Structure formats: C-alpha cells, structure tokens
Amino acid sequence: MLLFIAKRFLTAIPTLIIVTLMVFGIQRMLPGDPALIIAGEQRDPEVIAYIRQQYRLDDPVPVQYLAWLGQVLRGDLGQSIRTNQPVTQLIWQKLPVTVELALLSMLIAILIALPIGVVSAVRKGTVVDYVGTLFALSGLSLPNFWLGIMLILLFSVQLNLLPASGYVEFSRDPLGNLQRMIMPAFVLGSGLAAVLTRQLRSSMLDVLKQDYVRTAQAKGLLRRRVVLRHALRNALIPVITILGLQMGALLSGAVLTEQVFTIPGFGKLVVDSVFNRDYAVVQGVVLFTSAAYIFINLLVDVAYALLNPRIQVGGGA
C-alpha cells in the first residue's frame, strides 16, 4: 500500500506541472494590462513602471513562470496584487467556508441518494422506482442558480424562515451559520444526489444479479440483511468514485451557488481575482485545488481496498 501511494504521488507531479503551465499561460493571454489595473486611476508613468518592476511584468513569460514556480517550491504562492495579502493566507481564510459547504452538500446528497437508490433497485419497475428515476432526472435538469433563486423566494421572501444570503462563522454563531448554509448546501447536494441515485441504482441492480447474492438468499438470510450487508457494500464502490470527484469539484468552488448566496468561498475568490487580473491568487487557488483533487482520488483508491479487500490496489491500477 505504501508503495502504491508513493507511485501515485510521483505520477501526480507531472500533472501539477502541466496544470501550472496551462493556468499561467492562459492568464497571460487575457486582454488587459495588470499594471494599469493595479494603478487604478493613478496612471502616473513612474507608478506604472514601479508596478511592472515590483511584479516582474516586463520579464518574458517563461522567466515569470520559472520565478513563480521557484516561489511555490519554497512554499510561497505569491501576494495578491489587489489586497496585498499573501495568497496562502487568502486560501486558508476561504478554505473553511468551502470545506463546510462541500461537506454539508455531500451529507445531504448521501442522505437523499442512499435510500432512494437502494429502494429503486430492490423494487425495480414499481412506482417507487419511477419516482426515484424522476427525481434523478429533475435533479440533473434544474440549474443551480435557478433552484437557488427559487429557494430564496420561498424560504426567505415568502416564509421568512431563512436568511437570503451572507455568511456567519460557525464558531461565532452555529445556528446562524447553519441557517445561511442549508439552502446553498441543498442546491449543490440535490444535483449531486441525482447523480448518486442513478449510479447507485444501476450498481445495485448489477450486484443483485450476482451469484453470491442469490446464494445468500438461498441460505435463508433475511432479504434486508442480504441487501444492506452484502449487496450494498460492493455497490458503493463506483459511487465512491463519483463522491471523490465531486468533492474535488466542490472544493474548487461552486461559483454560481456562491455568487447567488454571497458565500465568500473559493468560487467567489476566483471570480473576483479573474476580473481584477489578480494572477497570483488564481494560480495559487488552482494549484491548491489540483493538489486536493489528486489527494482525494488517492483516498478513493484506499477506500476501494477497505470496502472490497479483493481489489488489489498495490498493483498501481
């Protein structure tokens, strides 16, 4: 297992390098002059020249990239040209917000998808199955921004039960935090639940046809025990893959949802940084989320082995 983990980390290095090259190069192709944006209304040539020198904007792009990569290897992701804050500090400020939103969304998705997916597979062709399939299709079809606006109109404007937007730290006001996070978490979680429901139903149908399930039923075991203890365990393996990938996507920032509910997470940070040509912040956030993707995929592979010991992860698959 340790050898497998080491191999995965080594293969991740070229991926991260390619990501940094793409992000760094594409940003430099965007129209606009960062020096003029930083200077604002102060268009004094001396000020602009100082900014160019300070941020090495006059150097060739390869030189700028190598200088930035050298800083990253030393643990320095640079400094925001808009707020003058270290990028690492900005990331650690936004990370708890995004992690909380992602975990709540995952929890809601699992609580919805697990019972619906299992029951739909066990009762294939019944009304319950059709209702579950309809839910999955509707969850995939509804845009996040539209669902978010509808929830705000219903629970904030009409019923006056939940705040429409904003964010409060959990440590300061736990109840206020949950009141503001429940709607955006449901928006993200409902879409993810639809994907998980379809995948879990399909996987359960395949597993229920396996010989070991039929053998367990033939031995007189209760159907509930066969489904939950034997079939569900193996059916969850492909579902974990989706959970891992979606967790990485949520950590990268649910841009539309965070914009609708004014949540100061990674998504809003990246959007603001792109509009302000804040290269260092965009590069730092993308690099961080790419590393998070790789780490989460590694955890998914480890979870495979825990759920099904017959899966040989040591071979480097």
Image (cartoon, rainbow, N blue to C red):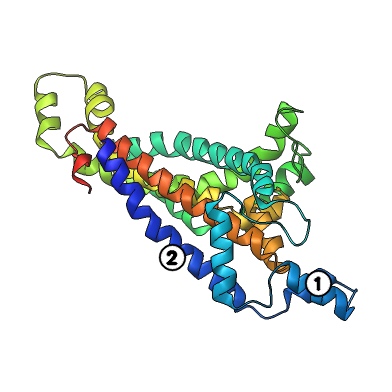
Judge from the rendering whether residue 271 lies leftward or rightward of residue 72; answer left or right.
right
Q: Position of residue 308 (x, y in %)?
A: 22, 33
One can see residue 110 in this view:
yes
Residue displayed at 72% across by 58% down: 80
Residue 305 circle label: none
Residue tagged 1: 50
Pointer 2: residues within 10 angstroms few (<14), some, or many (20+)?
Answer: few
Q: Is residue 119 left or right of residue 251?
A: left
Does residue 34 sit above or below 97 in this rendering?
A: below
- Answer left or right for 15 relative to 147: left
Q: Give the residue type that dot 2 points to.
A: Ile
- x 62%, y 61%: residue: 282
Measure the alpha-carbon separation of dots 1 and 2. 31 Å
What percent of the width, then of the height, locates residue 158?
77, 44
Drawn side of residue 157 relative to residue 256, left or right: right
- The residue that appears at 65% across and 61% down in the rendered structure is 280
Disc 1 secondary structure class: helix
> Quadrant where the N terminus lies?
top left
x and y percent of residue 86 in the render? 70, 51
Residue 18: mark: 2
Camera sees residue 149: no
Q: How many marks?
A: 2
Rendering coords of residue 75 (x, y %): 57, 49
The front one of 37 and 210 is 37
Q: Closest to the observer: 56 or 152?
A: 56
Residue 137: which quarter of the image?
A: bottom left
Three-letter code for the amino acid on which mark 1 is drawn: Tyr
The correct choice, above or below, for 232 with respect to 270 in the image is above
Q: Nearer the viewer, mark 1 or mark 2?
A: 1
- Assign a secondary structure to mark 2: helix
- N-term-proximal mark, 1 vs 2: 2
